[in-house]
Image (cartoon, rainbow, N blue to C red):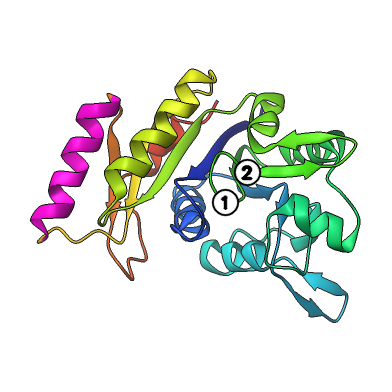
Amino acid sequence: MSKGLFITGTGTDVGKTYVTALLIKKLCEGGLRAGYYKAAVSGNEEGPGGLIPGDGEYVREISQNGQTLASMVPYVYRQSVSPHLAAKLEGNPVELEKVAAGYRRLSREYAFITMEGSGGIVCPIRYDKKVLWLEDIIRQLKLPSLIVADAGLGSINSAVLTAEYMKQNKLPVWGFILNHYHDDSIMERDNRYMIEQRTGLPVIECIADGQRELETEAEVWKEMYI
């Protein structure tokens, strides 16, 4: 039976794809069958067979999990905008059932699936005659989450607001991963402390710039997948 975990962030460009790639790599190195999934990805370039899902390509390169790009992302857009707007500009809006069906197919092949979100937790995935938000996908797939946050200035506010929104909307959260972390920074050490104090959630790992391995063991990450 496959198990899953959702990776969301405090916003765009906080390092969700980078963290997800390292997490899948760690699971693979621990001898586990680990796959990647993302409902929709924007800002992609054309390849020989069409648009290439850049995030999926990056994860595959870093993790070396051998997964096909076609199985990673069902909706791929060219425009570097939110998926709901990309679909309005390019067509092919996201259907929840197609996303769920792709996840189920992947579940038959991989024991552990790490699903990455688009943008932050309050991200519109579709907004036309149908309305679909990122949290609707999390609920549909019944996944717990980890929150990726930048370790620098402003992280307390963005991390706490994200966690509180998810708690209020009954979206299970295990904790945080802080990216771009500098252990010699008193501010960033304090940010970590204050985030934990205000949310009651642990910072599971702090990742330095250029880090290529997660320090937390695969067995610990494994327990977060349900």
Please give left or right for residue 24 compared with residue 54 in the image: left
Q: Residue at x 53, y 18 (%)?
A: 170
- Name the foreground residue: 59 vs 84: 84
Residue 80 in magenta stretch: no
Quadrant for the C terminus, please: top right
Magenta: main secondary structure: helix
User: Which quarter of the figure is the N terminus placed in?
Assistant: top right
Q: Residues within 10 Å of mark 2 (few under 14, many from 20)?
A: some
Q: Quadrant of residue 114?
A: top right
Residue at 48% across / 19% down in the picture? 168
Q: Which residue is mark 1?
A: 119
Tell me whether circle 1 and circle 2 mark residues in contact (CB < 8 Å). Answer: yes
Left or right: where 123 falls relative to 157: right
Circle number at residue 123:
2
Give the residues in magenta: 185-199
Placement of 35 over or under 173, stated as above or below: below
What residue appears at the point 86 percent right and 34 percent down from the top-left corner? 130
With respect to residue 14, does 3 lie above or below? Answer: above
Q: Secondary structure at mark 2?
A: loop
Could you classify mark 1 by the number of other residues whose Cα lies within 10 Å: few (under 14), some (14-19), or many (20 or more)?
Answer: many
